[in-house]
Amino acid sequence: MELRHLRYFVAVAEEMNIHRAAERLNISQPPLTVTIQQLEQELGVRLFSREGRGIQITRVGEFFLEEARQILKSVHDATVIVKEVAQGIRGGLNIGFISSSVTGILQNCIIKHRKLYPDIKLDLNQYSGNSIIKGVQNEELDIGIERLPIYLPNDLEQFPIIKESWFVAIPEKHKLAQKKQVTIKDLKDEKIIFYPRWNSPASYDSVMQLFSKNGFEPNIIQEATEQMTIAGLVASNMGIGIVPECMAKVKMPNVVHRPIAGTKNLTGFTLIYHKNEDLLVEQFMDLAKKIKF
């Protein structure tokens, strides 16, 4: 059975006249009659009853008509969807993001994208650090939002979308809270809260280099993978947290933020994606490059 058989059958059933159905299909009557007969033979049922020169659809034919219409509609819909996917106006993107990106970066990208491409589904999932790179490499993710700096594999590309400084999160009654800006040397005798190296190796290493250049290693007394967890621990007077600039925008009781001198543009956010990106990824990247964060 071919789609042609279904189209011919539906035309005859709707016109209830072989001549009009043939004109509608832009074919002659004989091949149309033969096609209907072939369809009935294949199904082993009578779809039409012949009464003189006229025809009537049978009860079986009425049931088959609904099924045939549904099949043809499904084929039509699938054809439309495939064309829209090829044109980049339908489909889906899997996006992985780190928690700190929800302070504004992620929202800006999503709002702009949904406005331009409402029929493209965005599947958003939060990941911890380096797992985003693995996800993009394995093509489980189409796009990742990661923290700068980053050790990037050769098969991936990146586009830095914003640069930031490093800040410290300090209990509001701590002596350093009185300063407008904190230096690395100010942190020499402090208890530090930071995220583990595996969470974001390049970013972690860049911060540790700041301490080594000043001749000492930080006294890291607690590690936490989530920025809000670090802030919560600081609020509990456990120590001083090292956080990216975006987290200074997040208000938490008993916590104040101060910039770390000499860290301007040392961190930030970057989009990572596969070099062999498809149209949907390309559109998302083009959009992100135009956003003013």
Image (cartoon, rainbow, N blue to C red):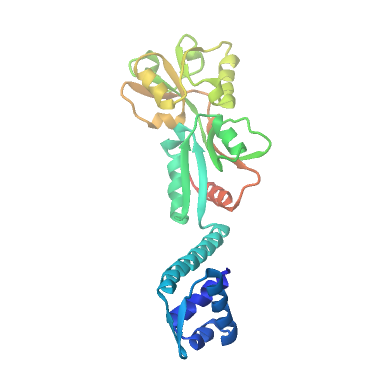
Name the residue nearer the viewer: 288 or 97.
97
The picture places residue 288, in percent across and down from the top left corner, at: 52, 47
- Please give the name of the residue rendered at 47% of the width and 75% of the height, measured from the top-left corner: 47
Name the residue nearer the viewer: 175 or 16.
16
Q: Residue furthest left?
A: 253
Q: Residue furthest front?
A: 44
**Residue 28 visible in the displayed image:** no
**Residue 110 visible in the displayed image:** yes
Left or right? Give the position of 187 relative to 157: left
- Please give the name of the residue rendered at 67% of the width and 38% of the height, measured from the top-left corner: 155
Figure check: 11 above or below 81: below
Q: Residue furthest top?
A: 189
Name the residue nearer the viewer: 167 or 75.
75
Quarter of the view holding residue 137: top right
Left or right? Give the position of 21 relative to 276: left
- Please give the name of the residue rendered at 47% of the width and 38% of the height, measured from the top-left corner: 125
